[in-house]
Image (tube, grey):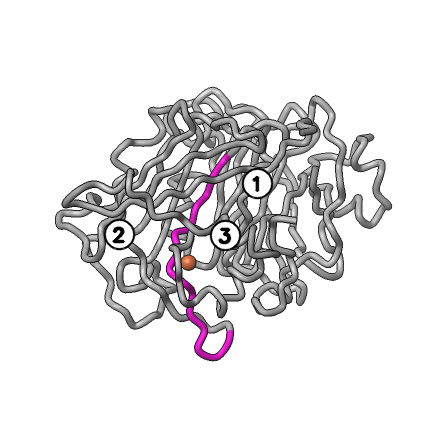
């Protein structure tokens, strides 16, 4: 069991939104459209969208980082030309979203949204700013560990994944019901990026590696 | 080992929606239909921070994201409005149904369902008891408009699928 259960009471918003019945297990036939997924063309995504530090006239504040990794299927094969989207807070822990009320400064030079297509090895790479922790109202003194939201497409619509990438050694992990909703330490570990000295660029930015492995498609039996 | 899912959270609104994401086909596209409805929680209250994705099973003639020019896209994305509403303008799929994914704050993984445009003999529909079957069939409303509500929990809870 990898994914969190829908109902995770410590994360209060699940209480009225978690379906009460388990999903119906459907046997896929060859015409099942959920076995296919959108195909993305290079004309649809600009390569500059992968650099979140160059979307405005000035440089954003904070620690510049490089986040890279591979998108893989359950057998470890690369998923090529697939869309990877990310969004995150600025260095101060504030989203450039009107609903975010956290009294931390906005950064006029940082929006915090980027996207790219993977290459032939399933590889993606973003340049961004290390996001900050932020408070939320789930419970008293609730803080989210710093994270980057990821949205990834596989080769089947059933593999569609939205997740969050965390940073190594965050002291907020034990207190975060969203991170803790994932069953078991081994599965939670897969949400934590690894510091990557090889992706780190001298005199410029630290590198973090985050590989994403998508679930089995219904016709794969291994 | 599979990477676990996490909620889309409340703040995706400036990142994931894209311009005209809800318009899989232009307004003058022959045979265009509108699929519209609301997302509701276990108390019957609207879910104002959900994101819906519609998939027709083929990428379409102009690409999945591209909304320029004539032709059709096979993929669409629409965030809900404060009253939980969403809409898609789309071509009719080759199958009797469209695939629909719903993400939201409070959903630690998305829910997947199907929007059937007509109640037709179908292996999935035929396997369901009538009340559950009804949750998957859109209601035709006038010319080319289909209403399909997603009830996440409770009375009339939508049939959700996994493969
Ligand atoms: Fe977040």
- Residue B8 in sight in this render: yes
Q: Dot 2, how many residues are within 10 Å of its Cα: few (below 14), some (14-19), or many (20+)?
A: many
Circle 3: element type: helix
The residue shown at (64%, 41%) is B146
Circle 1: element type: loop
Left or right of B163: which side holds A206?
Answer: left
Residues behind callouts 1 and 3 on a single chain: no
Left or right of A181: which side holds B128?
Answer: right
The residue shown at (81%, 31%) is B123
Is the residue A168 above or below the residue B35 in the image?
Answer: below
Q: Which residue is mark 2?
A: A129
Residue A164 or residue A97, whichever sits in front: A164
Q: Dot 3, how many residues are within 10 Å of its Cα: few (below 14), some (14-19), or many (20+)?
A: some
Q: Can you give x and y, in whole percent of width and height, for residue A202 in the image?
A: 17, 42
Q: Which residue is mark 1?
A: B1
Query: Which region is colored magenta?
Result: A139-153
Choose the circle earlier in sequence order: 2 or 3: 2
Residues behind callouts 2 and 3 on a single chain: yes
What secondary structure predominates along the stretch shown in magenta?
A: strand
Cα distance between the residues tagged 1 and 3: 11 Å
Tags 1 and 2 in contact by the CB under 8 Å rule? no
Circle 2: element type: strand
Quadrant, the C terminus of chain A: top right
Cα distance between the residues tagged 2 and 3: 22 Å
Left or right of B161: which side holds A41?
Answer: left
Q: In the displayed orientation, state which residue is furthest to the top.
A: B61
Say whether residue B122 is magenta: no
Residues behind callouts 1 and 2 on a single chain: no
Q: Nearer the viewer, mark 1 or mark 2?
A: 1
Name the subunit of mark 1. B
Q: Which residue is mark 3?
A: A189
Q: Nearer the viewer, mark 2 or mark 3?
A: 3
């Amino acid at each position: 069991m990898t994914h969190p259960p829908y109902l995770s009471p410590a994360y209060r918003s699940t209480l009225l939104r978690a379906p009460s019945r388990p999903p119906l297990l459907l046997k896929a036939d060859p015409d099942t459209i959920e076995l296919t997924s959108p195909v993305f063309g290079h004309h649809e995504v600009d390569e500059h969208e992968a650099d979140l530090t160059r979307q405005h006239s000035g440089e954003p504040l904070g620690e510049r980082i490089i986040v890279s990794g591979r998108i893989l299927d359950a057998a470890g094969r690369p998923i090529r030309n697939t869309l990877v989207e990310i969004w995150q807070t600025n260095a101060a822990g504030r989203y450039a979203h009107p609903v975010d009320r956290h009294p931390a400064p906005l950064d006029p030079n940082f929006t915090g949204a980027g996207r790219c297509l993977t290459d032939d090895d399933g590889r993606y790479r973003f340049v961004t700013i290390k996001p900050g922790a932020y408070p939320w109202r789930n419970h008293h003194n609730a803080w989210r560990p710093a994270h980057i939201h990821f949205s990834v497409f596989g080769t089947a619509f059933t593999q569609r994944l939205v997740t969050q990438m965390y940073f190594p050694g965050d002291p907020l992990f034990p207190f975060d019901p969203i991170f803790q909703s994932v069953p078991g330490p081994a599965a939670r570990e897969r949400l934590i990026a690894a510091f990557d000295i090889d992706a780190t660029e001298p005199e410029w930015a630290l590198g973090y590696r985050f590989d994403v492995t998508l679930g089995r498609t219904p016709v794969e039996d291994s | 080992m599979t990477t676990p899912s996490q909620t889309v959270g409340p703040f995706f609104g400036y990142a994931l929606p894209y311009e005209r994401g809800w318009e899989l086909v232009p307004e003058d596209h022959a045979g265009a239909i509108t699929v519209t409805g609301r997302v509701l929680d276990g108390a019957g209250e609207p879910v104002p921070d959900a994101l819906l994705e519609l998939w027709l099973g083929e990428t379409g003639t102009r690409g999945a994201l591209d909304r320029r020019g004539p032709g059709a896209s096979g993929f669409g994305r629409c965030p809900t409005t404060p009253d939980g509403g969403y809409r898609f303008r789309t071509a009719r799929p080759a199958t009797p149904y469209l695939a629909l994914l719903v993400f939201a704050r409070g959903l630690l993984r998305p829910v997947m369902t199907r929007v059937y445009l007509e109640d037709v003999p179908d292996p999935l529909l035929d396997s369901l008891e009538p009340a559950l079957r009804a949750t998957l069939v859109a209601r035709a409303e006038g010319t080319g408009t289909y209403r399909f509500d997603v009830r996440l929990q409770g009375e009339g809870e939508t049939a959700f699928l996994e493969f």
